Amino acid sequence: MSWGNHHRKSWGTKVIDTLDHRSVVGGVICEALRARYGELKHAPKRLAALTGTTPRTAENWLAGQCAPQVAQLVELMAADPGIEEVVMELVRSRREIRSA
């Protein structure tokens, strides 16, 4: 494995680009957060309260600079069925890609 391909994983004959997948998933989740919470007054504070994180971290999510970590994402999914649906759609999409 070369340095340039350290983010690629192979299962049988399938090669999955995990770095690209992470950036797509993070972008989709951040976009869903912006769509749901971006226009709300004090959105970062509301997201921080839902996830047990800081408002600055939530601002970063809304700006698309980073995505929530797993524990924070689970809290968001538990609190907001719309976010849960976005994540589950990502899971369904990945399953389709893997089974192709």
Image (spheres, rainbow, N blue to C red):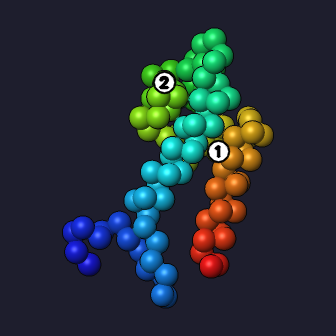
Residue 2 placement (x, y as % from top left): 22, 75
Whether residue 50 is visible here, answered yes or no, is no
Residue 95 placement (x, y as % from top left): 65, 69
Q: Residues within 10 Å of mark 1 (few under 14, many from 20)?
A: some
Q: Alpha carbon of mark 1 to alpha carbon of mark 2: how far?
A: 18 Å
Q: Which mark is residue 74?
A: 1
Q: Quadrant of residue 19?
A: bottom left
Q: Is residue 10 left or right of residue 76?
A: left
At numbered mark 1, what does the secondary structure look like: helix, strand or loop?
helix
Q: Quadrant of residue 28?
A: top right
22 up-or-down from 52: above or below? below
56 up-or-down from 80: above or below? above
Residue 74 placement (x, y as % from top left): 64, 45
What amino acid is found at the position of numbered circle 2 in the picture? Answer: Glu
Q: Looking at the image, which is closer to me, 94 or 50?
A: 94
Circles 1 and 2, Cβ within 8 Å, touching? The answer is no
30 up-or-down from 22: above or below? above
> Residue at 69% of width from left, 47% of height from top?
86
Q: Which mark is residue 16?
A: none
> Residue at 70% of width from left, 54% of height from top?
88
Q: Is residue 57 left or right of residue 28?
A: left
Q: Residues within 10 Å of mark 2 (few under 14, many from 20)?
A: some
Extreme residue toward the bottom, this view:
12
Extreme residue toward the right, this view:
81
What amino acid is found at the position of numbered circle 1 in the picture? Answer: Val
> Residue at 63% of width from left, 18% of height from top?
39
At numbered mark 2, what does the secondary structure look like: helix, strand or loop?
helix
Q: Which residue is mark 2?
A: 59
Whether residue 82 is visible here, answered yes or no, is yes
